[in-house]
């Protein structure tokens, strides 16, 4: 906006300079050309002669002469005795108080303003004091340096009259007024056009926002330009995208909630029905041998474990979708010692179940800041997911590397295609993401179809760890 206003001002200034330059060239080259100047001087003398003749003006009647000069704003006049060159009248400063001393005033040299000429003396003095000047032709001008002199016959005598026309000032002043007015008009027109354009863009942006609000939130906001309005449109569109993302997440949560309720109601009812049935048989003693009783007890235990797993699953669900976002207390740990202990425990359990776990030979010796208890829960969820969906025939590779001031742990496993067909609510991974956020690390999963990667990134702590594990 400021740049546009500045451009309008520059255009206006250039217009003023251009018009004034043209006017100055016209005045200096045409209007003030010698023939044109003499022509204007003769015209002014003719008007003055007509005034003198019509009103019977004497050479000493300064009041009448001043009356004529008052009607000629851009005319300078000197009247002096043609016999002895004493000044009788000079426009601009002569008044009635000088009338008594007119005949005794001495000859002097007058330096006029920039727009007047200077009387520097006669070009020729041969007939200056001659009485024959009274009979000289009125049409003949006696030329002085910088001025034109003409004989004028007053009611009492004939005098020499020198005039200077500086009406070029009127042209210059008029041009200045016109140029300034034109510049102001150009400036306001440009600003008005720009303001109309801005108003149109704001109105369009408002209409798009209303459309997004009332009709179609997926309708994109048009972003044009790089000014403040474009930034506003970009921010509005970014807010719209965040709302869409939030709505999508809410839909995912709603679907996960619905699926969980459906699955949990079915999964809990089935083992609970079986458990109740076998417990009723045991209570009523409806078994023929001890082996039957032991079989019933084993079945009851198995169903109880299923119910426990379902209750753990329900707990994770409420943990993930609960409102708790509190930051956990963290401490500095030796990364190598901490991960050897945490990962080693789960790796041992999976090895016992037939999985092949490949641990890194040497872990980087860095310190990290985390919460050991929740880190253990995080890896518990990761290895629980591996146990459900990993292919036992392929090794599970765990690696560690230092990159960009971070310690990155990667767990990779091949996917058991049969196990992958099982329905999943994704609560386990959501739980991992929430725990990772609370303990100050990043959590990323990469599903390539046949392999599944989990990456954990911890910021390296510059200070020495306060404790080991």
Image (cartoon, helix red, strand yellow):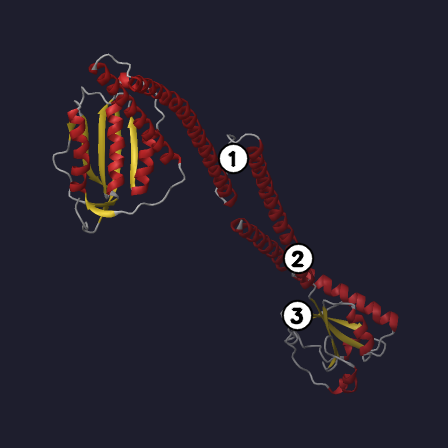
* 345 up-or-down from 299: above or below: below
Residue at the outermost left position: 361
Viewer-nearest residue: 222 or 365: 365
Viewer-nearest residue: 350 or 51: 350
* 416 up-or-down from 205: above or below: above
Closer to viewer: mark 3 or mark 1: 1
Question: In screen coordinates, is 183 left or right of 437?
Answer: right
The percent position of residue 208, horizontal first and vertical second, equals: 56, 35
Closer to viewer: mark 1 or mark 2: 1
The percent position of residue 335, horizontal first and vertical second, equals: 18, 42
The percent position of residue 137, horizontal first and vertical second, equals: 78, 69
Q: CB of mark 3 within 8 Å of CB of mark 1?
A: no
Return the disc, 1 or 2, that comes first in the chain's sequence. 2
Question: In screen coordinates, is 20 left or right of 243?
Answer: right
Residue at the outermost top position: 288
Helix, strand or loop under label 3: loop
Mark on residue 116? 3
Helix, strand or loop under label 1: loop
Viewer-nearest residue: 372 or 304: 304
Question: In screen coordinates, is 109 left or right of 228?
Answer: right
Q: Residue at x 16, y 46 (%)?
A: 468
Q: CB of mark 3 within 8 Å of CB of mark 2?
A: no
* 77 up-or-down from 248: above or below: below
Return the disc, 3 or 2, that comes first in the chain's sequence. 3
Q: Crowding near pointer 2: few (<14 within 10 Å), some, many (20+)?
A: some
Label 2: which residue? 175
Label 1: which residue? 222
């Amino acid at each position: 906006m400021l740049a546009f206003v500045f451009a309008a001002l520059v255009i206006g200034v250039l217009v003023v300079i251009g018009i004034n330059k043209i006017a100055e060239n016209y005045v200096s080259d045409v209007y003030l050309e010698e023939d044109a100047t003499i022509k204007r001087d003769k015209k002014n003398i003719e008007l003055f002669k007509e005034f003198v003749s019509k009103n019977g003006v004497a050479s000493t009647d300064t009041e009448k002469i001043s009356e004529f000069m008052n009607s000629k704003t851009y005319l300078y006049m000197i009247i002096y005795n043609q016999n002895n060159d004493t000044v009788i009248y000079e426009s601009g400063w002569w008044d009635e108080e000088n009338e008594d001393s007119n005949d005794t005033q001495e000859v002097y040299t007058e330096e006029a303003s920039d727009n007047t000429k200077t009387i520097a003396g006669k070009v020729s003095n041969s007939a200056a004091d001659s009485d024959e000047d009274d009979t000289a032709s009125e049409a003949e001008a006696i030329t002085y340096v910088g001025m034109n002199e003409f004989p004028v016959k007053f009611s009492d005598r004939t005098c020499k009259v020198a005039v200077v026309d500086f009406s070029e000032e009127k042209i210059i002043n008029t041009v200045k007024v016109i140029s300034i007015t034109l510049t102001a008009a150009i400036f306001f027109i440009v600003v008005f056009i720009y303001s109309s354009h801005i108003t149109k863009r704001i109105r369009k942006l408002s209409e798009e926002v209303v459309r997004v609000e009332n009709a179609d939130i997926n309708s994109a906001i048009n972003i044009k330009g790089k000014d403040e309005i474009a930034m506003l449109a970009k921010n509005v569109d970014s807010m719209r995208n965040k709302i869409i993302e939030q709505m999508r997440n809410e839909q995912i949560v709603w679907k996960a909630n619905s699926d969980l309720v459906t699955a949990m109601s079915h999964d809990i009812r089935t083992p609970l029905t079986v458990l109740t049935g076998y417990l009723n048989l045991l209570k009523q003693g409806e078994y023929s041998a001890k082996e039957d009783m032991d079989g019933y007890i084993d079945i009851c235990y198995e169903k109880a474990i299923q119910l426990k797993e379902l209750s753990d699953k329900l707990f994770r669900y409420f943990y993930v979708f609960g409102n708790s976002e509190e930051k956990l207390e963290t401490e500095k740990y030796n990364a190598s010692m901490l991960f050897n202990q945490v990962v080693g425990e789960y790796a041992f359990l999976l090895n016992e179940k037939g999985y092949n776990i490949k641990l890194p030979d040497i872990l980087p010796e860095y310190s990290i800041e985390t919460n050991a208890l929740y880190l253990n829960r995080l890896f518990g969820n990761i290895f629980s997911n591996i146990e459900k969906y990993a292919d036992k025939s392929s090794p599970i590779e765990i690696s560690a590397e230092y990159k960009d001031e971070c310690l990155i742990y990667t767990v990779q496993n091949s996917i058991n295609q049969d196990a992958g067909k099982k329905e999943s609510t994704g609560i386990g991974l959501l739980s991992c993401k929430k725990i990772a956020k609370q303990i100050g690390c990043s959590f990323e999963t990469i599903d390539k179809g046949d392999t599944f990667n989990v990456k954990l990134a911890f910021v390296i702590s510059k200070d020495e760890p306060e404790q080991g594990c």
